[in-house]
Amino acid sequence: MLLTITSTTPPATDLGYLLHKNPARVQSFELNFGKAHVFYTEATSERCTAALLLDVDPVHLVRGQRGGMDQYVNDRPYVASSFMSVALAQVFGSALAGQSQERPELVQLALPYQAKLAVVPCRGGEPILQRLFEPLGYTVTAQAYPLDETHPEWGMSDYFTVTLSATTRLSELLTHLYVLIPVLDTEKHYWVGDDEVAKLLRHGEGWLASHPERELIARRYLKRRHLVRAALAQLVEEDDPDPDASEEAHAQEEAEIEQRLSLHEQRLGTVLAVLKNSGARRVLDLGCGEGRLLQLLLAERAFMEIVGMDVSHRALEMASERLHLEHLPALQRDRLQLLHGALTYRDRRLAGYDAAAVVEVIEHLDAARLRAFERVLFEFARPGLVVITTPNAEYNVKFGSLPAGHLRHKDHRFEWTRAEFQTWATGRAGQFGYTVRFLPVGPEDPVVGAPTQMGVFTR
Amino acid sequence: MRTLTLPELSLVVLIGASGSGKSTFARKHFKPTEVLSSDFCRGLVADNENDQTVTHEAFEVLHFIAAKRLTGARLTVVDATNVQPEARQPLVELAREYHVLPVAIVFNLPEKLCQERNRQRADRDFGPHVIRQQTQSLKRSLRGLEREGFRHVFILSSPEEIESVTIERQPLWNNLKHEHGPFDIIGDVHGCFDELTTLLAHLSYRVSWREDGGYQVIHPEGRRAIFLGDLVDRGPNIPGVLKLVMSMVAEGRALCVPGNHDLKLMRKLRGKEVRVAHGLAESLAQLEPEPPQFKKRVIDFFDGLVSHYVLDDGKLVVAHAGMKAEMQGRGSGRVRDFALYGETTGETDEFGLPVRYNWAAEYRGQAMVVYGHTPVPEPEWLNHTINIDTGCVFGGKLTALRYPEQELISVPAAHTYCEPARPFLKLEDQAPALTVQQQQDDLLDIAEVLGKRIIPTRLHHNVTIREENATAALEVMSRFAANPKWLIYLPPTMSPPETTQQVGLLEHPAEAFAYYRHEGVSHVVCEEKHMGSRAIVIVCRDEEVARQRFGVMNEGFGICYTRTGRRFFTAAALEAEFLERVRSAVDRSGLWDDLKTDWLCLDCELMPWSAKAQELVRQQYAAVGSAAQAAFAETIVALQHATARHAAAQVLLERYRARAELTERYVAAYQRYCWPVQSLADFKLAPFHLLATEGAVHVDKDHIWHMSTLARLCVDPLLLATPYQVIDLTDLGSQAQGIQWWTDLTVRGGEGMVVKPLPFVVKGRKGLVQPAVKCRGREYLRIIYGPEYTAPENLNRLRERRVAGKRSLALREFALGLEALERFVRHEPLYRVHECVFGVLALESEPVDPRL
């Protein structure tokens, strides 16, 4: 909402010439998201502080959006976000470009400046602020705020009042702010137009390429606002306001926990080996997610018919993209089918296949719903071969980053020990006329076993 | 005059050369939509009715449409030359596939006449050889039509005869839709004469022996019996049973469908080669002393039986071995076979008997199907079908189903007359933990929820579920929702009133009152709206009731779930403790006995909001408050400095101080609904609808009943009785009182109130009236419309909102939710309940303004 810039180089009021704004006046500017006001809180020869204050229109913010589905309870009117960058460019355009008619010599001078932002949203807090600004020569101080003073148990917010001090040219300071304010803000970006992206990149010239965090900057900065599917968004529960985002975050966490092992690749490799070895021609990937296994299956000519099913429509869209389904030649395309479905409902589309892979799926089902899943798979779909993988809970002690007693993924409803999985699998095999054998996946520890356990059921 | 009698459901194939007058005939005797003409189909595919190059495509279209019509049981006439056997064969097959009777009407006219008529038509320019060939083909076909499979063949041989025809449509033999009962449907008797007479006596029939060897049977209320076949074989007194049943049928006291044993005996009596097994020997031995005339009468009796009956406006179907929906009321060899034998999977079991295909598990028809054939220890309902063969001859019992009462009455067998090849009374598990229906309900079929669906509701016509909404619902339902057996209801959304023009407000009770008054409602209740999370609570007396009534095992005696069907509590111990408290409150209230129930379903608000919405409060509400407070603090300091220098900054300072004040009020607004929960003592449950109990959905009671009945539960501090007011909408004073009540509530920081018409369900000028309208308070709405919504420049724009979409949605969801409860209370199969609940969830994913 507020940016102040302080100069302490006498005559400090020269700041007014550099910014093209008269310290004696209060000026207001109409912008297409609201208003910006420029005024000076002090203007002496020793010290001069200019303030850029935004007045973001909260109603226009929501109503202007297509569909108008956004929340009115929104931090945008109160933070320095991409709106601040837009305002900088429009209100301090000449200064940003390094132009001054009255004091052209000052423009080239590196002088001590202090900039203060109230407030910036910054997930990751002070360390991120330091990583972004310190390489550019700034001294960074940040003041944090609790989420709610009356509820200290809720912890701290992601908002900071940030003070940046450096001896630099004013245009550089403004350029850095222009580019890095939106980077701090990993949340939603309300670009005024698509060309803003190009503009922002242009302003990175000369310093961004050598910035040690350039990848982080580029990634955060080009990240566009999620197009959360409108329909699903309506069903969101209050305890998980953005399931897609948290699902991604959880998958990321799980991947990070398991990363050292590149466990997922080993898992898929093992599943592929079992499927190939079985001579199956028509195979199901139940809970196919974004299609990593489908990709491997598609590369094997032996699999003539491949069906990927998932409960997440979004995952299927991503699978379709990953596999370039739209652009596959017809012969390849015809081998693969993606289905939206759930493993707790009987599904006639799944009947009659040679084999089914159910990779890291069962632990996402409530224990009480497992019975339905068993019947859907073993009684009705009834493939000749079933490969099920699930985490081995015993191995969790080996993951340094996983606190004791925690599950690897927030959506896991359970994680089984080897004995628990084998008891379950043997019981189901007997009940439905299969025999089952077990395989470890990943490095096997003599005490706690392998990180992933696999059951191979055959009829 | 020539009368052609056609079965009401038949595929009528007109056969005749071009120019023989088929189309004219068809126009005269059938509805235009009943007639499918090959010429018309040629026109559809090629814009030219005479284009012979598209004949193949035209017939594909014709067969396709015919198949659709026959699926819907509609008489269909095929108007094409059909003079060649290969043209007729696919039509006969089509008729067979849809179990309708193929009928041939042949236009056997002299070639010359056809040639003459064609010459007069400009559009028929094919040569005379075509007509000649057609006429010759027709002559060659005449004798073989019945062999080709036509069940009726009518040959018309002159223009005069064709002219004189009248057509009569005859109902099928199995169509007894006009018979409404009441009936007593009796399972497989197999010669158990004593048990049959005892059963008839229990059913109040008076049976007396007649001089001629028959029986006179009278029911004082005129009820009639229906026998499901298998009267003979295995049992001790087969002739007695035959005499009794044949008398009853002859006198119009009973209907009877044939069983497989009956027809096998008939064939044997006719001298056919039949293997004497499965109890046929007993029938033959016991009939041996009977006179030949009796055997002749038995043959005629069985010969005259119709495979199955459709009764009572199509609501009841009876057949020996059952009847699939797509075969009911139709006639074909396969229908008859199904009625007699059912279907087998082709496998045999460990006793060497064919494994029966459980058609009833797949049954989704509207009609109740009552059948026998396979002995079961207890008759059990499954998807609106029931098998009442309880194996009397095997030492079980003889069972009758009273229709429409749906009462079962049984008489135990006096002896085990015959040892079954496959033991059907399983001693080791005579009392299965779940009923057949409940076991069936363990698994729902995805085809019954996905895709576009249309659900009929009693309250509000048909409700359409769009495919994309079903897709969204499936994801939520399968990833997060509780066991579908618990989910007998999901709550509807609720609309606010029309926007008020009162200064500083968006919502006000006056608009809600006006809405109901205009709909003709005289009294409303205003209930305090609690700011928590919507919760549905089901409690049973004990786990045994949960098993019996809900088919839920090992999941406790109740549940508390959210508006999307998720378990409210993630900690099982906390949920158990919570439900225990609710149950003990019900125990103490005496409601179990007063409502004659052992379970109940409550619609509630569970507080605090922060218990469920913790993440939302932190990530969104508290975060915005924190950002705003920090930013305004810095800004106001800066503006104070500026004001010291320029007077012009004073305006800005005042503006930002005012904005800061609004955000303070916003923070105070959400804080009111948040308090930490460490134990159950920190929760409050406010029930406001007692939705359903055994045998009743309480939508016939008004809201005062709901409020006062639920108040009896609120003796436990966990439970909170909702304060309410009754307002007379025809009395300005009363309305002012309601408005004052709302003002007092909301000034204190309350969320607001819900206004409902006094009766639960009201039909107004244009159909169903909103079951409830919410009036939210000014401060509360800050957490909906943003901290600064009350600033005049914001409020004026926010007033432009439309409630029509939300209201339509609320009505559809309300109707579906109540439909789900109705179906559950009437013990319908789970798929019928689930489709409604799933529908509510799907509708909830429709895009509507989330702030309404």
Image (spheres, rainbow, N blue to C red):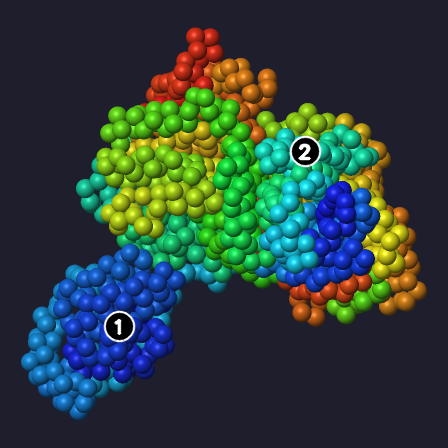
In space, the residues marked 1 and 2 are separated at their CA atoms by 79 Å
Above or below: residue B173 compared with residue B238: below
Give me the disc on residue B45. Answer: 1
Classify residue A442 by image quadrant.
top left
Q: Position of residue B6 (x, y in %)?
A: 31, 70
| Front-lying residue, B140 or A324 | A324
Which amino acid type is marked by label 1?
A: Val
**Is B849 positioned to the left or the right of B749 in the image?**
left
Q: Are marks 1 and 2 in contact (CB under 8 Å)?
A: no
**Is A93 positioned to the left or the right of B168 in the image?**
right
**Nearer the observer, disc 1 or disc 2?**
2
Same chain shared by disc 1 and disc 2: no
Which amino acid type is marked by label 2?
A: Thr
Q: Residue at x 88, y 63 (%)?
A: B735
Residue indicated by mark 2 = A139
Determine the residue located farthest toward the top in the rendered image.
A446
Q: Can residue A288 be seen in this view?
A: yes
Q: Where is residue B384 in the image (x, y as percent from the top left)?
A: 50, 47
Determine the residue located farthest toward the left in the rendered image.
B129
- SS at mark 1 in the image: helix
- SS at mark 2 in the image: strand
Q: Residue at x 19, y 86 (%)?
A: B123
